[in-house]
Image (cartoon, rainbow, N blue to C red):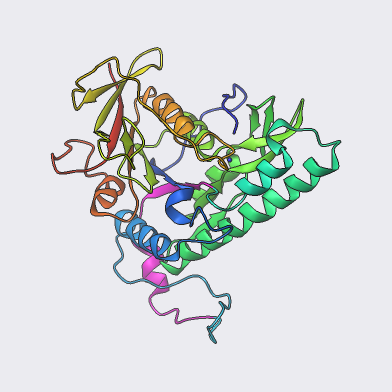
Amino acid sequence: MASNGSSTSTTDVNLTKPLRCIVKLGGAAITCKNDLEKVNEENLEIVCSQLRQAMISSEKVVGMDWSKRPGSSDTCGSVDGLEDQLRADSNNFIVVHGAGSFGHFHASKSGVLKGGLDQPLVKAGLVATRISVGILNLEIVRALAREGIPSIGMPPFCGWSTSVGNIAAVNLSVVAKAIESGFIPVLHGDAVLDDLQGCTLLSGDVIIRHLAAHMKPEYVVFLTDVFGVYDCPPTEPNAILLREIAVGEDGSWSVTKPTLQDMNKKVEITVAAHDATGGMVTKISEAAMIAKLGIDVYIVKAGTTHSLKALSGELRDNIPDDWLGTVIRFSR
């Protein structure tokens, strides 16, 4: 979901235990983008399993989703071992997910991005968009909970506002309190209220940049449906994976690995027609702003050994030659 501004009204958040990581679950990686409101359950299950492996030391998994699921007769599984699991050493982290095949269609059809709550279509579209992304958020929270991760859904509509698309005000105290209480906040791209145009869309990538600026994670991981950033659409046979991108003081970025034959070649980025929030264009821009803060950003394919290494923090000191992904770093 699209705002591209920053806020001056939010103060930095000091946690008792440092924030290890902010993880973005890309909409294309966890949903079937060509099927309206369909979750890619296999990918989501693998991603949640990797998050547990990377962030929680306990090997025993005691699920926390006690609600009845379709096809299941049980509403509550065994809680044996739950106490030991919650006492196990774990890392603080935040999950932010995109909308994928949820929300974008509804937002595009109604013009929520440009605002205008006096128009019935826009108001109805905001409601429809929020219902759709809320359904996805619940599915992700449940998938994390089944892996024993104490996740809590936190819709940005409550607490985040914009002004002509730029973030105007955010209350991060609720997010911080949830983390301090031992929970994992799960935020998402959302339709939010805007001070001047009534409403707009707030991208999950923008949310991550704002969280990173004020909560100072050790690193940020974007999980996508491709191995990283390419010099042209990855579907093209000659596409080259950009393994390392350096960000300058002014926020501009350049490819440092591999050395492209034509250094003046413009990196081509395509955006799906239904993607209301800018797709990869927004992702790279926001990732560059995060890297400028001195926080390494990894863009990697979800559900792979490469993503597990990124989530685990194994790449912070050394990136092996066989690792497939894109790292974006500040060039001091």
- Could you say which is closer to the camera, residue 243 or residue 166? 243
Whether residue 158 is visible: no
- Could you say which is closer to the camera, residue 271 or residue 151? 271
- Could you say which is closer to the camera, residue 112 or residue 148? 112
Rendered image quadrant of residue 266: top left
- Residue furthest front as drawn: 237
Rendered image quadrant of residue 200: top right
Position of residue 268 in the picture relative to residue 156 (left or right): left
Position of residue 115 in the picture relative to residue 10 (left or right): right
Q: Which residues are magenta?
A: 76-98
For the point 61% across and 46% down, the residue is 104
For the point 45% across and 49% down, the residue is 28
For the point 50% across and 53% down, the residue is 33
- Residue furthest top as drawn: 250
- 77 magenta-colored: yes
Residue 100 coordinates in the image, percent (x, y): 52, 50
- Quadrant that contains the C terminus: top left
Residue 141 higher or lower than 289, as above or below:
below
Residue 308 higher or lower than 64, as above or below:
above
- Quadrant that contains the N terminus: top right
Residue 326 coordinates in the image, percent (x, y): 28, 36
Q: In this figure, what is the number of numbered marks? A: 0
Residue 184 higher or lower than 21, as above or below:
below
Whether residue 232 is visible: yes
